[in-house]
Image (tube, rainbow, N blue to C red):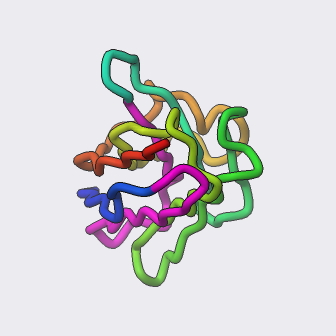
Amino acid sequence: VQLQASGGGLVQAGGFLRLSCAASGRTFSRYAMGWFRQAPGKERESVAAISWSGGSTYYADSVKARFTTSRDNAKNTVYLQMNSLKPEDTAVYYCAATGRVSTGQVMGLIPLYDYWGQGTLVTVSS
């Protein structure tokens, strides 16, 4: 699976962005998809994830009620809608795919993801 994230940019605090992650390959619908981010000088952290069917999602506490992930298997694309953005959301955002887990909180575990896209930079100004 090859992944391509897009949609990053510069936004003011309180604003919104929608990230997209386009996947190649016919087996996209078999993978759980995750969103992760890495801020300068910090370790990569999980943000959100969604099961292959879209029926199960995971969110980090820091983004709950502000971010929403969804997917369109017909378009081989997963989305991350980010609302009420804060300066601390500034990071490079990555999408990733895993066939090892399919549901639940474990979808937030970085080591379980095998396929990674290049990142897209999100900058939130105060």
Residue found at the far front of this picture: 126
Q: Decide: is 11 above or below 113.
A: below
Percent x, y for residue 95? 39, 49
Residue found at the far right of this picture: 65
Q: Decide: is 123 above or below 80.
A: above
Q: Residue at x 69, y 52 (%)?
A: 66
Q: How many marks?
A: 0
Horizontal arrangement in the rendering, residue 49 relative to residue 93 (left or right) = right
Name the foreground residue: 24 vs 34. Answer: 34
Percent x, y for residue 44? 41, 25
Name the foreground residue: 112 vs 46. Answer: 46
Residue found at the far bottom of this picture: 74
Q: Is residue 51 magenta?
A: no
Horizontal arrangement in the rendering, residue 3 relative to residue 14 (left or right) = left
Q: Residue at x 66, y 42 (%)?
A: 63
Which quadrant is the N terminus positioned in?
bottom left
Looking at the rendering, which quadrant does residue 98 occupy? top left
Q: Residue at x 41, y 81 (%)?
A: 75
Q: Decide: is 19 above or below 104.
A: below
Percent x, y for residue 27? 38, 66
Horizontal arrangement in the rendering, residue 4 relative to residue 95 (left or right) = left
Q: Is residue 29 magenta?
A: yes
Name the foreground residue: 117 vs 10. Answer: 10
Q: Residue at x 48, y 63 (%)?
A: 17
Percent x, y for residue 22? 33, 68
The range drawn in magenta is: 12-38
